[in-house]
Image (tube, rainbow, N blue to C red):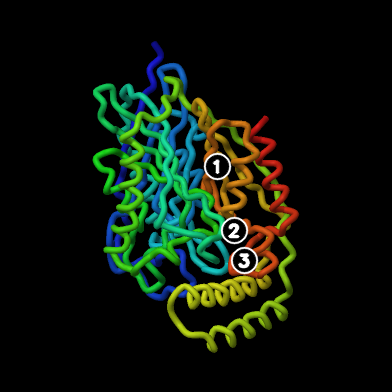
Amino acid sequence: MNELLLAATSLDVTPPPGHRLDGYAARAGLSTGAADPLRATLIWLSTEDDLGVLWLTLDAIAVGSTLSSELAAAAGAAAGIPPSHVVVSASHTHSGPSGWTGEIHPVIPAERERPLVDSLVGAVRAAALERHPVTASWHSIEVIGVGTNRHRKNGPHDTTAGILALHGLDGSLDAVLLDFACHPTTYGPENLQYSADWPGAARAALAPAVVGFLQGAAGDVSPRFTRQGRGAAEVARLGGLLASRVREALATPGLELPQSAPSIRRTTLTLPVRSVPPVDESEKLVSAVESRVNAEPVGGPSGRISQTLLEGARGQALMAAADLPPALDLPVSTVTMGDVCWINLPVELFAVHGACLQADSTHPITRVIGYTDGYYGYVVDPSAAEAGTYEALITFFDQPATNTLLHETATFVNS
């Protein structure tokens, strides 16, 4: 019998203090330490005669194309497989170092810090990956209370968590590949400590299983309307809520998956970069939004929406002054295992886009994963584009390009 084999490990890759944190344009100051560890988690599923797929999930704002290539090569070396069999995904925590990936968008200037990169890549390359037989099952469960649409409470949001459970032959839960869509932004711009945010708390609550976290179509989803604070206690509460629902799902039999290795297919989609309004027009928008923000009360969800709108206006002005390329090449991939298909994209899709890709998929179970194998910012829906939201102001893509991305991705998934 051709057994399904698992090798899984979770590495503490927390950098030393004294480096810039990423995710918030309003943040000032360098990291002062760690509230909880940042991790690189490796989950490799294969058989003796099939190299399978290795997921590398990282507590980071993003994995740019260069970092993604370096980590795929390092993980591949650790497993003895080609980098093409490695999928690299970021959790999108807003409390990780900017120095791993460098500048992900002109809105937050940053540079790669080679010592931080070398330490991270070296840790992954040295990872011990010993395989043992497992069985695989699929579970899905609704999770309410961690996040909502961040523009309006009742707006679009995939409230389901997808769970690939991997059990040892003795029945032990050895590893979980968990996906859910919500920004890890419990900590705000005032925080100067590294943190995996609520995905890290969920991972810790599910120990001793090795847990890899995949971020879904979370471009317009966050804890803005659900969080009850900004500190460690709230991180633990939200992560614990997700973990408790995962445990409930795992208490049921689930869908048994075949004892065969997952397979991966890849393609590249080229999208034109939108025409950004000229500098003078963008700067006029900044002045108009500044006046609006100054006239509104500070604090709460409405205050945060106004503040992010200002950050978006400033970001668009920076884009107008930057030398943007005419087009961007986006790596897209699918991983399939039995009835389950993960669609991996290097962008922050809005919730409606994830729903569209799921609806168009011919696979019985489809999960849409962002922030993978690169990073090319937000992809916004028509309502956000018309309203001129924060995300719409700093996206690289207009609506025709967005439609092309969705159509060509669906075509690839079903080919």
The quarter in which the N terminus is drawn is top left
The answer to which image quadrant residue 93 occupies is bottom left
Disc 2 + disc 1, Cβ < 8 Å: no
The image's mark for residue 378 is 2
The image's mark for residue 344 is 1
| 63 sits left or right of 135 in the view | right
**Up-down: is 2 above or below 41?**
above
Q: Looking at the picture, how far across and down is residue 301, in whole percent?
A: 47, 73
Residue neighbourhood size for the residue with mark 1, other residues' Cα within 10 Å, grouped as few (<14), some (14–19), many (≥20): many
The image's mark for residue 394 is 3
The answer to which image quadrant residue 283 occupies is bottom right
Query: Which circle's residue, 2 or 1, is located before the other in the chain?
Result: 1
Residue at 44 percent across and 34 percent down: it is: 54
Residue at 39 percent across and 59 percent down: it is: 96
Say which amino acid is labelled 3.
Ile
Residue closest to the far top: 1
Q: Looking at the picture, how far across and down is residue 397, in whole percent?
A: 68, 58
Residue at 62 percent across and 72 percent down: it is: 318
Q: Kindly tell me whether residue 106 is visible in this rendering.
A: yes
The quarter in which the C terminus is drawn is top right
The alpha-carbon separation of the residues under discs 2 and 1 comes to 15 Å
Q: Looking at the picture, how far across and down is residue 66, in whole percent?
A: 52, 49
Query: Which circle's residue, 2 or 3, is located before the other in the chain?
Result: 2
Residue neighbourhood size for the residue with mark 3, other residues' Cα within 10 Å, grouped as few (<14), some (14–19), many (≥20): many
**Up-down: is 356 above or below 98?**
above
**Up-down: is 311 above or below 78?**
below
Q: Kindly tell me whether residue 66 is visible in this rendering.
A: no
| 364 sits left or right of 50 in the view | right
Disc 2 + disc 3, Cβ < 8 Å: yes
**Up-down: is 145 above or below 129?**
below
